[in-house]
Amino acid sequence: MIPRYSRPEMVEIWSPESKFRIWFQIEAHACDAMADLGVIPRENADAVWRARDVTFDVERINQIEAVTKHDVIAFLTHLAEHVGSEDARFVHQGMTSSDVLDTAFNVQLSRAADILIADLEGLLTALKKRAFEHKMTVRIGRSHGIHAEPTTMGLTFARFYAEMARNLQRMQTARREIATGAISGAVGTFANIDPRIEAHVCEKMGLTPEPISTQIIPRDRHAAFFACLGVIASSIENIAIEIRHMQRTEVLEAEEFFSKGQKGSSAMPHKRNPVLSENLTGLARLVRMSVTPALENVALWHERDISHSSVERGIGPDATVTLDFALARLTGLVENLLIYPDNMRANLNKFKGLVMSQRVLLALTQAGVSREDAYRLVQRNAMKVWEDGKDFKTELLADPEVTAALSAAEIEEKFDLGYHTKHVDTIFQRVFGTA
């Protein structure tokens, strides 16, 4: 977690203080349930809860762990220092370390997911606003980086909106899948702890009981969660790449906001670089780094090993903190993005009507010309535009084979831009539910 790419609310979820507070709540709720079932005296459970306002000393826990070489035991030892050894003797009764670690980890991931869901909702709002703002702002569509046919800037934003709406659904699903807890004891058989204790703890922690947990919560859940983060990161990069291309000097259809006093280059004072978009591309790579290790964590030895543990201590905070920052940065970028419709129109017309080639091709076939001949006629005139800078419509009007099939008026009509925007309302209705 690099402070440069972190936001406080998400970082707080992963702080040692927050982690130990969650551990305490799990242990205290378990004691409550045990007391209700008559497994431990009520006064012992109440004594544990009297430590609810304690600020756990992270350095003290680390000191204990340096001796015990076990983080949960170190925490329980420190908790006993506050509660008293006599009252704390029933803490962790029948539980195993994974009951605390896995349940707490899923609490943290669920809380992180809540922030990411809010981030996505904010991004969707920004994308929708820009989509309607530029619904009919015509620009050239590109395939393979080459001019294709006209589209609109609104459709570009609508496309990104639809993609992020799917990501919101994925994140909501991932949150539900990860929000399970396990208080099932060694190898998950409940031999030394009643399943009702697990149900109580999960309810209090906002989780549902894991149906079968061995000694750990199955890691396919976590694999799906981090895979979801990876998909969202790739969608962020998808938008960032488009913005980077649009900001290229020879394109300049859109541009990141350049604030007063901002510098683009230490050497070239004229530079205005797409630094936010480039940063987002890099951050997306960092988030995706968590996906393969999470997938590899699914296969563990028998009922439990800890090969997943070191991985999750890294990817849990790193992936969620980085993605939270990236989503917030992208939202601001979209909100403040400068759009240049005049440049879009200039780029559209750069090759003098060439982008209407398919309309002419179709018109020729409808006029009775074979597709092979129609393609040959259109391509022959199109190459004059590419190679000699000719005007496409002028060349068509001067081609006797073309005019033998199409009248001048019919050729002229094929260069109407409105033809390409006639279904924009339909697409917006599909994406937003309203045009």
Image (spheres, grey):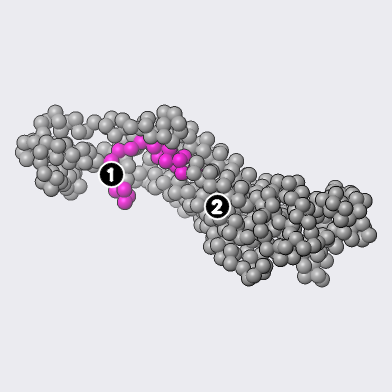
Residue 278 shown left or right of residue 321 in the figure: left
Task: Please say whether residue 396 is one of the residues in the magenta stretch.
Answer: no
How crowded pointer 2 is (Cα within 10 Å; few <14, some 14-19, many 20+) is rated as: many
Q: Is residue 217 left or right of residue 408?
A: right
Residue 243 visible in rendering: yes
Name the image quarter holding the N terminus: bottom right
What's the CA distance linking mark 1 and mark 2? 33 Å
Is 93 left, or right, of 257 in this rendering? right
Which residue matches tag 1? 148
Residue 237, numbered circle:
none
Kindly check if marks 1 and 2 are in contact, taking CB atoms under 8 A apart as contact.
no
Q: Quick one: quadrant of the C terminus? A: top left
Along the viewing direction, whichever of 333 and 63 lies nearer the viewer: 63
Residue at 41% x, 31% y: name it: 429
Q: Nearer the viewer, residue 373 or 131?
A: 373
Judge whether 125 appears above or below 50 on screen: above
Residue drawn where x is 17% and y is 31% of the image: 412
Instruction: Give the residue type at disc 1.
Output: Ala
Q: Based on the displayed image, in which of its 4 quarters is residue 72 positioned?
A: bottom right
To which residue does mark 2 refer? 229
Q: Position of residue 433 (x, y in %)?
A: 45, 31
The residue located at (71%, 62%) in the rendering is 188
Q: Secondary structure at mark 1?
A: strand
Task: Name the residue rendered at 34%, 46% in the picture.
Answer: 250
Residue 16 appearing in the image:
no
Q: Which residues are magenta?
A: 143-164
What residue type is disc 2 on?
Leu
* Disc 2 element: helix
